[in-house]
Amino acid sequence: MEIRILETPEEMAEVEQLQRVIWPGSETDVVPLHLLITAAHNGGLALGAFEDGKMVGFVFGFPGLYEVPDGPRLKHCSHMLGVLPGLRDAGIGFALKRAQWQIIRKQGIDRVTWTYDPLQSRNAHLNIARLGAVCNTYLREVYGQMRDGLNAGLPSDRFQVDWWVNTRRVERRLGKTPRSELEIDNYDSARIQQVYNVSIGSDSLVRPPESFSVPDQAMLLAEIPSDFMHIRQTDFSLAVSWRAFTREVFETCFGLGYLVTDFIYDREARRSYYVLTHGQATLGDFTVKK
């Protein structure tokens, strides 16, 4: 696989076509060639992943500003990351983000932001666990009513993540010897609080509780469905319930000062959990049960 910077109209036409395949159903949501190439030639960045000369994935972003007490500062807004459906577990998304990380650092930018659906566990694992992004920003209906086949009908709530590209946290995940990912057993043995407990219905679908308790520990676990798209396709009303429930959970936790710092996928049980921390809490702060 080859990763390279995209600059030509022909390459941007391939990005247009990839968008139609990855997010089918709404031509008006496709970012057009003329905008892609204008952004790329004026401080933006588009990267493509190629196999045997065919583009199979891309990442696209552009410069933006954010406010700090002494005025606006420059950041990179990573707007789109897409990989062909049949290749989504082949490490292509990670390779594209790693190349983006290398280039953005050379531009002298230290912060990258992007949004993703917090109920999509594959994206959560890539963004939080593998790339080292963090999140304390929950955005309601950020894109309004979306019309593509993956998002139509659901409120377009999103996490906005922060990727601090020069930190040791990120360098440990993207360096030549990345850190080993923690497993659910590490948190169970430390008796980390679960914000709520899910249930499994007779249809084998994961269901949220009706309510949750306000957390009181410095480190928390919040479970989400491991395959939200399956729930959406099988029981749309349940998907809507998950959106409403997790909206309340994350807005409450972020309002109390918690930060999403990790994500766990329990492969044996096929269950997925966000890790939220308050302050500088780490697993080492908790007594491990012998």
Image: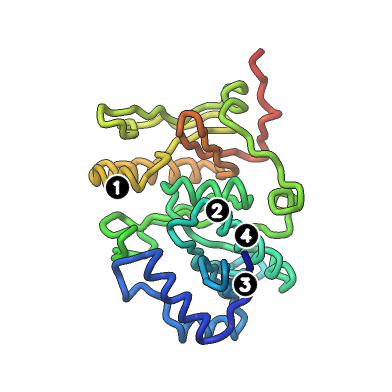
* x and y, in percent, of residue 61 in the image: 55, 72
State the residue position of label 3. Answer: 72
SS at badge 1: helix
Q: CA distance from mark 4 to mark 3?
A: 30 Å
Q: Nearer the viewer, residue 175 or 154?
A: 175
Which residue type does callout 2 highlight?
Ala
Comes first in the chain, label 4 or label 3: 3
Quadrant where the C terminus sits is top right
Comes first in the chain, label 3 or label 2: 3
State the residue position of label 4. Answer: 95
Q: CA distance from mark 1 to mark 4?
A: 29 Å
Label 3 vs label 1, nearer the camera:
1
**Visible residue check, residue 47:** yes
State the residue position of label 1. Answer: 232
Q: CA distance from mark 1 to mark 2?
A: 24 Å
State the residue position of label 2. Answer: 90
**Mark 4 vs 2: CB contact within 8 A:** no
SS at badge 4: helix
Q: Residue at x 76, y 47 (%)?
A: 177
161 with respect to 152 (left or right): right
73 with respect to 235 (left or right): right
